[in-house]
Image (tube, coloured by chain):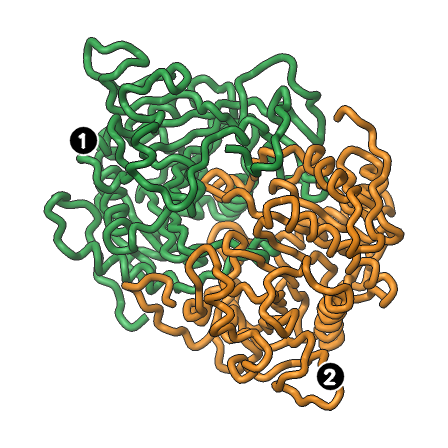
Chain colours: A orange, B green
Amino acid sequence: MPILPMFTVRALPHPEYRRDSIIPDRWVIISTERAGRPIESLPFRLDDQAVWCPFCEGRESETPNEHESLREAGTSSDRPGWRVRVVPNRFPAVRSVDSSGPPSDHHQQPGIGQHEVILECPHHESQLANFSTEQFYDVLWMYRQRMRYHHDMRQFRYAQLFKNVGAAAGASLEHSHAQLIAMPLIPRELQAELDAVATHWNETRKCLYCELIDRERHGPRTIGESSHFIAIAPFASRFCFECWILPLHHESHFDAIDDVTLTIFARDLQRLLQVLSHSLGNADYNLIFHTAPFDDERNHYHWHLEMIPRLTQAAGFEWGTGYAINPVPPEQAAEFFRDRLARPKQSIADGLVTPEVPKGV
Amino acid sequence: MPILPMFTVRALPHPEYRRDSIIPDRWVIISTERAGRPIESLPFRLDDQAVWCPFCEGRESETPNEHESLREAGTSSDRPGWRVRVVPNRFPAVRSVDSSGPPSDHHQQPGIGQHEVILECPHHESQLANFSTEQFYDVLWMYRQRMRYHHDMRQFRYAQLFKNVGAAAGASLEHSHAQLIAMPLIPRELQAELDAVATHWNETRKCLYCELIDRERHGPRTIGESSHFIAIAPFASRFCFECWILPLHHESHFDAIDDVTLTIFARDLQRLLQVLSHSLGNADYNLIFHTAPFDDERNHYHWHLEMIPRLTQAAGFEWGTGYAINPVPPEQAAEFFRDRLARPKQSIADGLVTPEVPKGV
């Protein structure tokens, strides 16, 4: 579906990174290929989409050839039999290297990169929260796998791994999937974090995030804690019920996570998504990974995952100022999560444990 | 309507500005009062809202007492007879000064400020594009008036003037209105612009925006030009059909605009909004004023208005990276606007004239 019925975008030969004319660290990706992607009308209707969903098992020919997959022994690439499958985005925001891109200068660069889609299950299912423990682990295993791939390749400096669920979160297809965009640039928000972390490290020889964890632990904004992770509602939450999951032990790169820790991460994350699904009205949400650039070997950064429910809309004030307005204090959001996590859930044996928290916040 | 039916926000005594724990220039306004505002289900239905709209003439008692209004001679405040009316927001993101706020330190400040709503017409009408020329001028006159008021008062450093139209742009009520939030802080995005402008001024003694205008003028991203204004699709447009309107003559503060120039600004802006309304599918949009802080007397900044149609959703990638993905090259957006502006429009005598632009972009 075109952006507008009355306007047809003419394809550019290549996507472009363009630097803002005023704010030097603000870049935009101009990508005409994105204009061609299917966008369903809101709200999604599962039955409608399942009929033609290109992400379902058996429709492998609807996607470009897979980068890799987790699949049954004896089955072939781009054939049924997979559990998790990674394919190039058919409507990529960026494109693999090509020599004939636009000139690269201070203001613009060719839109090189790699835009992947991680198909998280073979059957038409929109909810990670409903996955089996094994399937959920396989999904996170593949997240790590793709990040390791790009880390090893060193073709790009960073890969933004993210997931959009529901129309309000910017999803255009409902079949459970994540995306990864590998780029030659360090994103503006990550750079701001890296700068803050570096400044703090130089002054104190301590990690800013480790200190954040120490400060928040057992406090009113702590949602829960397991053997390896803590979930908090950040002090300056931009979104209602925003939640960050951070590893308790300092680690700069998500893809360094070992299998055992990944199992715990999967269990903790799924538990939080179940609260989102069952107790927050099945809210649309984004998952956004923050991890150190591939070429950053200083180990000062502290990877984490941001879960942002999309219950409110960014409006003129937010776009104009860069400041968010949030009607739900994170202390109340954390309390809500703690309460729901404390309720027994048969399908999940353990996971995040709610700590004792001072009352009366 | 609460944010979620199953969750009731407990009111904080005061809104708070909170600084992000990691990125020092990122602030969030935590405001529980915003949770109480009415939010209609999408899409808006004019007939439904008109029945109970608190912004219509005759329902003055539904809003707090007015700050000021343009009204018929002989009519009283908070009574019918007004053309444009400014009232405090009933669900303010910030609150007027009060001595009992939270402590002010590096991490947080009391959420002081002033959150106003500018009711742009007495009758239930959602579209600025359809206003009479006189009514449209009155609206912009009041925008200037409120900015002058806060400029003169010097109680706050900045006032963000903005307008949300339609649900996708974050509007909760459809009756045509703008908003203004006066604050003690300089917003992050404006500060980034001020920094860039100051750096460039120190190096060249020239205004970055004046140079931008010189560079773009008559080029492929120029939408149109009148005696006093130029409209361009910015080189790194974040949104499809994003449009900036800049005064041709250098001026740092919007509220310094004189009556004659305001007339021209009103005509030019309305013409662009008519294209948005008639040729861009009546797209939801934001108007965002960028102007120098009240206490900035250096005159290095160059005020402008950003018009951003909301045809696509910011998703995980945009929130994670701070980079936008835009499928419509601004050169094509500008061409679209130029084509539509060139068509005769009986209701508007003149206004933005489409310049000759090199073809084949």
Mark 1 crowdedness (10 Å alpha carbons): few <14, some 14-19, many ≥20: few
Q: Is residue A170 above or below residue A358?
A: below
* Amino acid at pointer 1: Glu
Q: Is residue B81 above or below residue A325?
A: above
Q: Residue at 22% across / 34% down in the picture?
A: B263
In front: label 1 or label 2: 2
Label 2 sits on residue: A72
Label 1 sits on residue: B134
- The quarter of the picture where the N terminus of chain A appears is bottom left
Res. B298 visible in picture:
no
* Amino acid at pointer 2: Glu
For label 1, the SS is helix
Q: How many marks?
A: 2
CB-based contact (under 8 Å), mark 1 and mark 2 = no
Between A213 and B293, the one lying in front of the other is A213
Between A103 and A220, the one lying in front of the other is A220
Q: Residue at 78% across / 33% down in the picture?
A: A220
From the viewer's perspective, tell me whether residue B356 is left or right of residue B103: left
From the viewer's perspective, tell me whether residue B282 is left or right of residue B309: left
| Chain of the residue displaying label 2 | A
Q: Whole-percent x and y of residue B42?
A: 41, 45
Q: Is residue A354 above or below residue A169?
A: above
Q: CA distance from mark 1 to mark 2?
A: 71 Å
